[in-house]
Amino acid sequence: MSAETTAPVAQAVPKPQRTPAARRGRRERTIGLVSVSTVVVTWWFAAHFQLVNTLLLPGPGEIVAGAVGLTLSGLLPSYIAVSMGRVLIGFCIAFAVALPLGTLIGMSSAVRAAVNPLVELVRPIPPIAMIPLAMLWLGIDEASKYSIIAYGAFFPIVLSTVAGYAAVDPIHIRAARTLGASRWQIFRYVILMSAFPNIIVGARLGMGMAFIVLVASELIAASSGLGFLIMDARSQFRTDWLFVGMITMGLLGFLLNHGLMAIQRRVLRWQIGSEQELRV
Amino acid sequence: MLHRGNVGLEVPAESAGQPKIVISGVAKVYVDPRTGAEVEALCPVNLSIRAGEFVCIVGPSGCGKTTLLNCIAGLVAPTAGEILVDGRPIGGPGRNRGMVFQEYGLFPWLTVEGNIQFGPKMRGTPLRELVAVSARYAKLVGLSGWEHRFPSELSGGMKQRVGIARALANQPDVLLMDEPFGALDAMTRDRMQDELLGILRADRKTCVFVTHSIPEAVFLADRIVVMTARPGRIKGLFGVPIPHRRDRASPEFAALYRTVDTLLRDEAVEDRA
């Protein structure tokens, strides 16, 4: 009964260290920077010495000048705002429908049996194929764009959510029950938390899809937005504006994805070691 | 403080009052949902456990010892029979019975602190008290300073300390442990057994501990329940008349080990026949 064997020994808390992985990451970032600048410099060189037709491929300088012009005229910022508004509203509609629906499908086998065949029938129709129908039903204003974007973002979110609920470990439910959690508390504090990583992955995939559908819908029927900008630039043969539009889209897509990834890393910091897997 | 168990089935003198847990005629038949075939996991079991008693259930794999524990926990409804805790039949899991799992069952999205606080939080304990609760139980299991770590950052032994702290923080009367040290290496296992006794001494609980390790049972238990292979039934009950801190190398220890081992060995032979 002596104290030294019965009292648990406090264990030392290790301090985080700079890992070889962190060093390798820095090296990889440097190489990436070098590769991007090589491409830009080569491009500038080719355009400057007329090695390519600059009417079709303007140099980086012209594109920057075009971007400055479009920004100063207020056109580019307003188009960015319009396009981002459409993406976010469409995405939020999709999320607001997909999360409860995915939850119902995940929690109830009856709902799953009823909804699954419908999902499997409708899902293979590409969102872009829905654009003409949306125009017929809802006209060419914002409502049709929101709905097509929401349609595109909907399926990745709903499917990931369902997969998340399927991934709940039964032992966590048993543990919560023995700790006195009610049914609602088990859902709120165990099932939802278990499904959360998949829901976030679904949101990222859905956001990517929303962005693709946005541009398609603006290319086909719009009088504003970044998709409209590049179509308009083509008809006016302003290749510099065309590139400004394309690059802006690329940057926005990059920012959206990285924003969501940052949220994912922050809320899922408990998933050490599975981070790679999450970067799908 | 030292408990002297009685060998055999006779009721020990200390349990003059009402027993903490009464298991009467508890049986479990599982039905395979696909084939409809019935599997008898547990033959009717009768067992009475006193308050503050440490009972180890040993038996071969698949002897229904975990089923019996799950029935006491209220996670599994018995096909027949009844379990009384403090004289009242149980109707599902309850806060008076905490459980520790072999696979830990920690919530990976919660820190050590969050895991320990889970039970009290579910019944609406205010935040300020929650912090005190988690600090106290983290200290009890030797994990002070680790409160903000996630389970994925802990070793197996540390995870199970959190599992024990989480169950105890809910202040159950009964601690149910399902092979809690089964996944640990031998050295950690011995140390955890020592520590468990220390923890339970500080915080007197009735404990039902399932294991397939005879030395573990002999080291920990006031009373050992030996179960047969499927369908499980009780084959023998042994009081452990060795005072705690038991010496794993002592002759008494070896003698009791041999008795239980022989009983289980017979079981294995019968099983094959």
Image: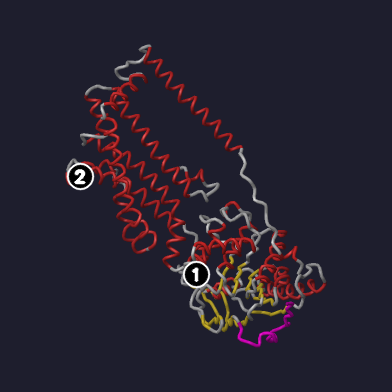
Q: Residue at x 81, y 67 (%)?
A: B249
Protein image colouring: secondary structure
Q: Quadrant of the N terminus of chain A?
A: bottom right
Viewer-nearest residue: A109 or A185? A185
Judged by its main secondary structure, the magenta piece is loop
Decide if residue A210 is on the left or right side of residue A38.
left
Q: Nearer the viewer, mark 2 or mark 1?
A: 1
Q: Amino acid at mark 2?
A: Leu
Disc on res. A133: 2
Q: Position of residue A178 (x, y in %)?
A: 52, 69
Viewer-nearest residue: B58 or A232? A232
Distance of label 2 from label 1 (alpha carbons): 52 Å
Q: For the residue labelled by badge 2, is the local secondary structure a helix, a strand or a loop?
A: helix
Viewer-nearest residue: B58 or A211? A211
Q: Position of residue A161 (x, y in %)?
A: 39, 53
Total count of labels: 2
Decide if residue B29 is on the left or right side of residue A148.
right
Residue neighbourhood size for the residue with mark 1, other residues' Cα within 10 Å, grouped as few (<14), some (14–19), many (≥20): many
Asked if the magenta segment contains residue B18, the reply would be yes
Q: Is residue B134 above or below residue A251?
A: below
**Looking at the image, which residue sits at the far right?**
B251
Q: Which residue is mark 1?
A: A180
Q: Quadrant of residue A102?
A: bottom left
Q: Amino acid at mark 1?
A: Gly
Q: Which residues are drawn in magenta?
A: B1-19
Q: Residue at x 36, y 59 (%)?
A: A105
* Dot 2 and dot 1 within a common chain: yes
Q: Quadrant of residue A131?
A: top left
Q: Position of residue B260 (x, y in %)?
A: 73, 74
Q: Quadrant of residue B179?
A: bottom right
Q: Quadrant of the C terminus of chain A?
A: top left
